[in-house]
Amino acid sequence: VRHASNATTASNYGMECNPGADGKSVPVYEWSEEGPYWLHPPSTESDEREEHYGNSNLPFASGTKIAKSGHYQLPPSSSYIFTKTHCGSRCADCPPKRYLETWQSFLKECLSGSRSIPVSDNTQQSSSIVTPQPSIQTKHKKAFTTYHPSLVKKAVHLLRNPFDNLVSRFHHELKEHAKRSDTAQWMKRYPNSIKGFKTWCADQDARYHREERSVDWTTWSHDDNNNLLNYFEGVACHAEFFRYAQWHSLASEVVKKLNIPVLYIYYEDYLTNLDGKTEELLEFLDLPRSGDLPDFDSKKDYSGYFTREERAAASDLMRRVASADGVNLLERYWVTLDFEKMRKETKALE
């Protein structure tokens, strides 16, 4: 979106945004410090602060250069502000109490994020007197935030093949652990390979076995109160597939509760129709096209990570977790095998 429109976007996560001159995350709306935040806040010299969003006092404090072309512009005041949020039910390697969600708790996570706040340790204290020492550098801390749902006017719902998505999440965990002190030990246990991936799944499945058996899974099924534990068996990373189906089902429910328009975009469509999908997204956001698109390079092949039987078993689980809307969105990815028929045919060979 930024490349195609030459306009900046926003994020719920102020810590990943460029800060203002005061070191704080810069909110899109002055009256909502809880977010969202400009990814590239405009400079103080910009006339944009008097033209956008009906407020001439927005804290546009930092100028963020992009390559050699100058600065990202603010999106036009008549357009919608494309904002990043992960919503809920997305933890990795976690027990059920961390990911079982209602639409209300999921919505709260969609509206939540964090911001950067300067924390000055540049003080000298004597008794009750505190004096600043400007020569010492200011540090920053993360403050967690939640903004009002009335700020949300539209939604863009991105979907990706659940099997590719799961391998991508494994790769994300690899990157996260590369930043930690347990890197060598973790990489030895879970190398970046199919074998490492399968070990990662098996360890998660075993680690939360006891917690899973304390949950009444019949209340979390959309398929005639079936006990989902029966469908966990034989599905590697079964909690990951549960979270995936739950996430997309709750995201669909939330946009209905908010009564807002939603645009569904499938990740794979970018491979076959990048320009067309970008135009569709820009039109939905009321953003004019003014830039060129970078190449969308996704030549990763994860087909060897799952057998057809494994895909079918995982699909059977997701089908029972997903709501009716979730099924409509996700069924294009599922594999169907008649396991009962296969069992009978196998038994007949005995």
Image: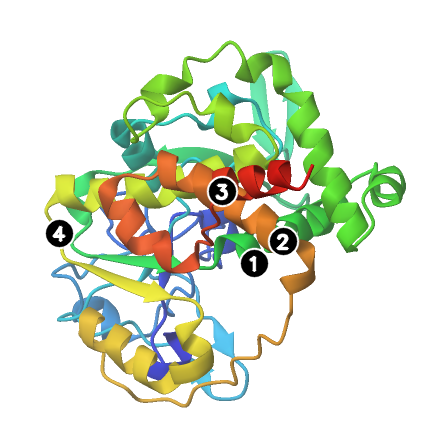
Residue 47 visible in image = no
Q: Which residue is mark 1?
A: 164
Q: Which residue is mark 3?
A: 341
Q: CA distance from mark 2 to mark 1?
A: 5 Å
Of tags 4 and 2, which is closer to the observer? Answer: 2
Disc 4 and disc 2 in contact, CB within 8 angstroms: no
Position of 136 compared to 340: left or right?
right
Residue 113, percent from left and from top? 41, 40
Q: Position of residue 189 (x, y in %)?
A: 85, 39
Amino acid type assigned to the residue bearing label 1 in the image: Asp
Q: Nearest the camera: 45 or 234? A: 234
Q: Secondary structure at mark 3?
A: helix
Residue 53, numbered circle: none
Side of 182 relative to 81 (left or right): right
C-alpha distance separating marks 3 and 1: 28 Å
Q: Describe the element under mark 2 as helix, strand or loop.
A: helix
Is the C-beta separation of discs 3 and 1 under 8 Å? no
Q: How is the image coloured?
A: rainbow
For discs 3 and 1, the disc positioned in front in the rendered view: 3
Describe residue 266's horizontal placement relative to residue 116 as left or right.
Answer: left
Q: Which mark is residue 260?
A: 4
Residues under numbered marks 2 and 1 in contact, where contact means CB atoms less than 8 Å apart: yes
Q: Nearer the viewer, residue 295 or 23?
A: 295
Identify residue for label 2.
167
